[in-house]
Image (spheres, grey):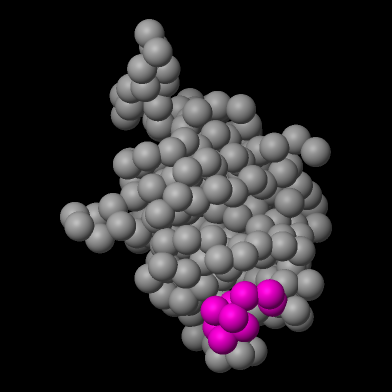
């Protein structure tokens, strides 16, 4: 299988606090990998490093064979210019806890924004693709609604459609249901299940253990900036080897 995401020795500190202490992770094309662990374990920080929203202190991250955020020259490694990093991010879609939609634009306009203004694609072609994406997430009839007229679950589904509009090779989800009322969680998870079934490569930070068990190929349990254990989702959740993993799952299951 093609290695789409490879992280080796990833370290990241904020001041004197080391948040990531040498993360190694490989995600193959078409896989769904869920990152589990307590708050403060470094899961979201790692996801932000994959998209170079945070600079690495050590280690490397590769997406589809390309070093993320840096280039090598003369045996040394240099951080890319912001425009070069932005070009790389086209292949990496990211959905955050908060929806971050443009409040003055409709759902359709939010989905059309990046392909139209970043890629410079013809507006009518982008419009049709955006409508198709809104249909895919069950919101075609809400295309003309602004975010303030949508529920939290609907806004998050628009955010997923917006990320898909750039046709990414990899989708990152940072606790996409944590800001939602409980009755709205299912509609977002259903969209993510459909993406997984269609073969989208996904790395998901989540506390939804049922989703991880049902949808993920692989689960990574993190604690205190380290990968404690990793393995096939159903196996790790049912029979965790490490005591720290067992204690965590006992609290959330």
Tell me the chief SS of the magenta region: helix
Q: Where is residue 118 shown, x and y percent of the image?
A: 44, 31
In the rendered structure, the answer to whether residue 165 lies left or right of residue 79 reads right
**Depicted 118 relative to depicted 190: above or below:** above
Q: Where is residue 207 shown, x and y percent of the image?
A: 55, 77
Q: Relative to the observer, which residue lies in front, 148 or 74?
A: 74
Residue 133 in the magenta stretch? The answer is no
Q: Quadrant of residue 157?
A: bottom right
In the rendered structure, the answer to whether residue 247 lies left or right of residue 82 reads right
In the rendered structure, the answer to whether residue 51 lies left or right of residue 190 reads left
Furthest toward the top, the residue is 74
Give the residues in magenta. Answer: 240-248
Q: Relative to the observer, which residue lies in front, 14 or 161?
A: 14
Q: Where is residue 45 shown, x and y percent of the image?
A: 40, 56
Residue 243 in the magenta stretch? The answer is yes
Residue at x-position 56% and y-position 86%: 247
């Amino acid at each position: 299988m093609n290695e789409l995401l490879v992280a080796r020795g990833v370290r990241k500190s904020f001041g004197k606090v080391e948040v990531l202490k040498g993360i190694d992770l490989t995600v193959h094309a078409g896989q769904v990998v869920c990152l589990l662990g307590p708050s403060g374990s470094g899961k979201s920080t790692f996801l932000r490093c994959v998209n170079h929203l945070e600079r690495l202190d050590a280690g490397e991250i590769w997406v589809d064979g390309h070093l993320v955020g840096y280039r090598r020259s003369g045996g040394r490694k240099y951080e890319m210019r912001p425009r070069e990093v932005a070009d790389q991010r086209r292949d990496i879609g990211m959905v955050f806890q908060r929806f971050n939609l443009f409040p003055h634009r409709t759902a359709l306009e939010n989905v059309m924004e990046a392909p139209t203004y970043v890629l410079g694609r013809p507006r009518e072609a982008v419009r049709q693709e955006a409508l198709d994406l809104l249909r895919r997430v069950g919101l075609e009839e809400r295309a003309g609604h602004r975010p303030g007229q949508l529920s939290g679950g609907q806004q998050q589904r628009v955010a997923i459609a917006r990320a898909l509009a750039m046709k990414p090779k990899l989708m990152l989800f940072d606790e996409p249901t944590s800001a939602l009322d409980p009755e709205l969680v299912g509609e977002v998870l259903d969209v993510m299940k459909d993406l997984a079934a269609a073969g989208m490569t996904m790395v998901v930070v989540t506390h939804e253990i049922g989703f991880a068990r049902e949808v993920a190929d692989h689960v990574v349990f993190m604690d205190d900036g380290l990968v404690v254990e990793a393995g096939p989702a159903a196996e790790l959740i049912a029979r965790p080897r490490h005591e720290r993993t067992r204690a965590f799952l006992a609290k959330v299951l």
